[in-house]
Image (spheres, helix red, strand yellow):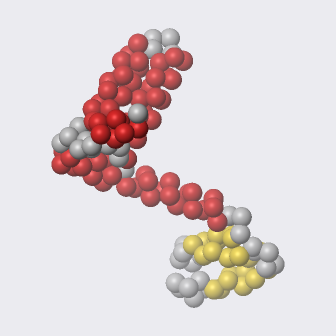
Amino acid sequence: MKDKFLRFMYGRYGVDQFSKCLVVLGILFLLLSGFTRNGGIFYLLSLAILVYSYFRMFSRNHSKRYAENQLYLKYTAGIRKKISAIRYGFSQRKHYHIYKCPSCGQKIRIPRGKGKIEIRCPKCNAHFIKKS
């Protein structure tokens, strides 16, 4: 069964970030259609989005699908960068405090559990005291 699917997918575009986003968006609209009174519009919209995402996955026109994905990545770069920064902050909060310099706003990462320490900003050389 796996071999048949692999042979079927050979030469096709497959899954990329834009396709993943479309599938998630389609599922969200599908869920929204179940929770609203007039859910028919959301249902049709979710169906159209899911059909388009599968069309992209099974397409053999690599250049067009690649261009669509690059356009999607270009327009969502800012949002993805902010989400990545938030995720990085959450992963670091167990072992580090992250402070902003009061004079220039530079973020400084300080290890936890060192007590009150004097912090020197590497950007502007300002000194301030914080608890780590």
Q: Residue at x 60, y 62 (%)?
A: 89
> 78 or 59, which lies in front?
59
Q: Quadrant of the C terminus?
A: bottom right
Name the outermost residue toward the bottom: 125
- Please tell me whether residue 88 is drawn above or below residue 40 in the rendered image: below
Left-right relation of 30 to 125: left
Residue 126 vs 66, above or below: the answer is below
Q: Is residue 21 visible?
A: no
Report the number of numbered marks: 0
- Residue 35 lies, in percent from the top left, at 54, 18
Residue at x 46% of width, y 29% of height = 27
Q: Quadrant of residue 125?
A: bottom right
Percent across and percent down for residue 120 are: 63, 86
Q: Left or right: 64 with respect to 116?
A: left
Task: List x then y, in percent, for residue 44.
Answer: 36, 18
Image quadrant occupied by the N terminus: top left
- For the question of whether residue 118 can be seen, the reply is yes
The residue that appears at 51% across and 17% down in the rendered structure is 34
Q: Nearer the viewer, residue 50 or 43?
A: 50
Q: Horizontal and vertical percent for residue 18? A: 34, 43
Residue 111 in the figure: left or right of residue 73 = right
48, 37: nearer the viewer:
48
